[in-house]
Image (cartoon, helix red, strand yellow):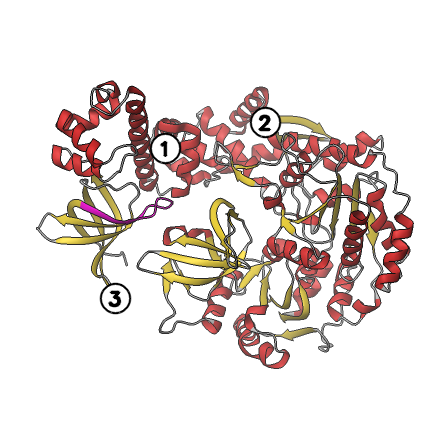
Amino acid sequence: MEREYSRIEGTVDSIIFKNNDNGYTVARASLSDGEEMTVVGVMPFLGVGERIIALGEYVNHPQHGLQFSVSSYEREMPSDKERIYDYLASRAVRGIGPKTARAITDAFGADTFTVLAESPEKLAGIRGISLKKAREIQQEFLRLNSMRMLMEFLSFWDVPNYFVAPLLKIYGEEAVSALKDDPYILCGEPFLLDFAHADMMAKSFGIEPDSRLRLKAALIYELSYNLQNGHAFIPWHKLIIAARDLCGEAAELLESALAELAESGYVVSEEIGAVQACYLEHIWRQEMFLAREAKRLYDMKLVPPPELERLFAEHERRAGLEYDEMQKQAICACFEHGLTLITGGPGTGKTTALQTMTELLEACGMKVLLAAPTGKAAKRMGQICGREAKTLHRLLEAALDESGGMSFRRDRQNPLSADVVIVDEASMLDMALASALIDALKPHTRLVLVGDADQLPPVGAGSCFADLLACGCLGGVRLEKVFRQAQGSDIVLNAHMINRGELPPIRKNTGDFYFMSTRSMGAAIDAVKTLVAERIPERFGVTWDEIQVICPSRQLACGTEAMNAVLQEAVNPPMPGRHEVRFGSAVFRTGDRVMQIRNNYDRMWRKCDSAEAGAGVYNGDTGVITLLDRASGMLVVRFDDREAEYSFDDINELEHAYAMTVHKAQGSEYRAVVIPLFSAPKRLLSRNLLYTAVTRAKELLVIVGREEMIHEMIAQGKKNRRYSALRMRIRELCGDA
């Protein structure tokens, strides 16, 4: 049933509160019927003196009384002298305060806004306003108008409001005109709006279905979309088929449009083996760069320091360890080559090698920087090595570029100050992040990549770590021996069996690895809920907030979306004093475990135990809602030792994290892991997905569901093919093609 809204009309008298980041506003308005009303909602750039027509609901706030909560609204700029003065006196336009507002409105009356927009030189006739200041006032007034029009335009078309900043950076005052001319702008990076959404807009603007604009947009959308499926390129004929299915136009027309894109250089078409490959130009450049730089780093001529053997022996004696030959090779490789690749499964000594390598490098006088793709992986790496480790985004100082996409302040013009950079969980490096990292290295800086090449590949394009290892000419050390201290763990032993394609003794149900068979989906859900809320905490002393449920997919009853609702109700149910807010079908409340689901380079955070502050919260960061205030429309999330504020309008950046997908859990470890395996899309039933999920558990693993699914996943050893030529390019450079 459709929701029924009330309607109000009135004039804004005052602004009580405004969040400039997201537009959440609390205002007092005089309504047409003579009443005064507090109006609350997302109303960016609302100003005193404006007339407002709003749809919404009357709500009774426990502290502030009756309010009108705005769902949608229209507004008109004030047109009479006194209302214009009220608007300007409220400092809506930077550079104009009450005194200047009075002088301007006395001089120009109802024509004030026309003068501000079109004749700034007339402002210079007012005492205290120079021609330079007049032009600055004009630019600010035009900027506000452009922003207001853009937000209203996007709101009308139901386009996310976080597109505003990048659109203004790219197109400035012409943003709305640019979108009317080409709404498919929104399908490309950094927006990636669904093609059908932009297509709906284009149809309304009169863009023909067979226009070159639309055909090229469909081709570019397919190339951009498939980056998220891991593909650096798409074969020409497959790209034509995919774009035809997307836009419904003839293959001949798309062939011609693709040829034009290739001729212009926006798309690079190159023969790769027997395939005509199509790349987005910047992805092609990244792949070429990675191939050249990997070869350059490995060929870097290095002479191990003369004291290395002595330092190694002293470390073994001090630590009471005796390394096997492969571990020694892994630890010392970075003293011989500029690029070191170390891979191995759980319990094979990667952690020990990482720690020892760092100590030896520093003992030899080298500056070492430690990093990992995710916050949890960086935290664990720092604990292992006893030194600070950063996420790669923080190390490279990620920020928004002028187009609203991701850029890094660290690059070849501003490189990292280090002799060696060591990256853990390197299997998660996609082409974009790997190339950004290498671009930020000084010519002499060595790079060490440590990871498990048998885990899932990265979410983005390419399989950089696996390709570097597999090309065969860049060395690489594979640690395979499971050490004695790890042999007591069924998690470790069973993970290696899964990786070899063998079915482990899952019904043994002792130690740290358990399997619970269930006959129905409902029974599986109930079992997971009981395990997290009761059985694991009671039997193993692991609290619910130390247990992570990891699902193969988001969908179906055992997917993350459904499991999160069930688990929230089990461990963090509604109760007096536990504040909550509804967002779509989800409810967020104080105490909820949540995850950031898109990179936000401008999201401010502050350290919980110091005055340190910074910006940047990234996709996959998990935390807990520590404060939720309905009056101000804000909530606070604590990410480990940092806190970040969100307005209710920013909740679309968060989702619950009681359960998460295997991809989201990669790079993290948890005391206890529960994996529901009852049903999942067939494309996800792979050995490396199961292997990655199992290896997230440190002390306890419980699989719930059907044994047949485990059999099916282990049998599916073939990894999903990714279109990438990195391995081939490196072999060609090495002369091994």
Separation of residues labelled 1 and 2 (CA atoms)? 26 Å
* Magenta-span inclusion, residue 730: no
Which quarter of the picture shows residue 299?
A: top right
Q: Residues within 10 Å of mark 3 (few under 14, many from 20)?
A: few
Q: Which mark is residue 267?
A: 2
Q: Earlier in the sequence, mark 1 or mark 3?
A: 3
Q: Are marks 2 and 3 in contact (CB under 8 Å)?
A: no
Q: Nearer the viewer, mark 2 or mark 3?
A: 3
Most extreme residue toward the front is: 128
What secondary structure is marked by label 3?
A: loop
Which quarter of the picture shows residue 431?
A: top right
Nearer to me, 373 or 264: 373
Judged left or right of residue 306, residue 90 is left
Q: Is residue 388 above or below residue 589?
A: above
Q: Earlier in the sequence, mark 1 or mark 2?
A: 1
The span picked out in magenta is 13-25
Q: Nearer the viewer, mark 1 or mark 2?
A: 2
Separation of residues labelled 1 and 3 (CA atoms)? 46 Å
- According to the picture, the residue beneath numbered tag 3 turns out to be 62
Number of marks: 3
Query: Looking at the image, which residue is at 68% across and 74% down?
Result: 514
Q: Which mark is residue 100?
A: none
Judged left or right of residue 670, residue 603 is left
Q: Which mark is residue 203?
A: 1
